[in-house]
Image: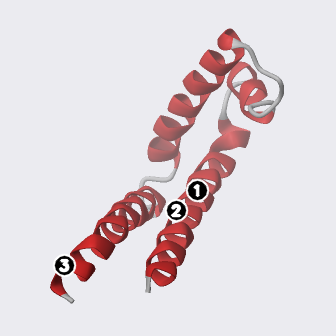
Amino acid sequence: MENLFNGLSLALVVGAIATYISIVRDVLPHLAPEHREPLKHYFDNSGYWQLRAADKAIRKAWQAHGERFPNSHKKQLFAALLIVAALSVMAYPLWLMVR
């Protein structure tokens, strides 16, 4: 049963990451070039300043998504997936206690 809870939690986290990437990809063409470049090279061999620029670009992309796509529910889906993943991690010990 532990594998079921772990698999479910992992699937929910992967879904949340995929939703987050989808949000950034939706808004990427609408960002300024100085914000686009750090996102394209986020996983390169980065130093502190490159990671800081990428974090700033992600913050800008998150804000731009709300402005460009006001009716999109991807942010809510992202939050819901993360919350349910956290709850599923905590549910296993509770299930053991009740069982």
Residue 29: horizontal and vertical position, in percent?
73, 41
Three-letter amino acid code at the position of disc 2: Val
Disc 3 or disc 2, which is closer to the eye? 3
Question: Which residue in the protein does label 1 denote?
Answer: 17
Question: Which residue in the protein does label 3 denote?
Answer: 97
Q: Which residue is the extreme one toward the top? A: 49
Quadrant in which the C terminus is drawn: bottom left
Residue drawn where x is 25% and y is 81% of the image: 95
| First-in-chain label (3 vs 1) | 1
Question: Which residue in the protein does label 2 denote?
Answer: 13
Tell me how far mark 1 sits from mark 2, CA to CA: 6 Å
Q: Residues within 10 Å of mark 2 (few under 14, many from 20)?
A: some
Find residue 63 and name its label: none
Residue 91: horizontal and vertical position, in percent?
29, 73
When the figure is inspected, residue 36 is found, relative to residue 48, above or below; the finding is: below
Mark 3 in CB contact with mark 2 (< 8 angstroms):
no
Task: Work out whether residue 8 or residue 55 is closer to the camera in this orientation and state it.
Answer: 8
Residue drawn where x is 46% and y is 36% of the image: 63
Mark 1 in CB contact with mark 2 (< 8 angstroms):
yes
Three-letter amino acid code at the position of disc 1: Ile
Q: Residues within 10 Å of mark 1 (few under 14, many from 20)?
A: some
At mark 2, the secondary structure is: helix
When the figure is inspected, residue 86 is found, relative to residue 67, above or below; the finding is: below
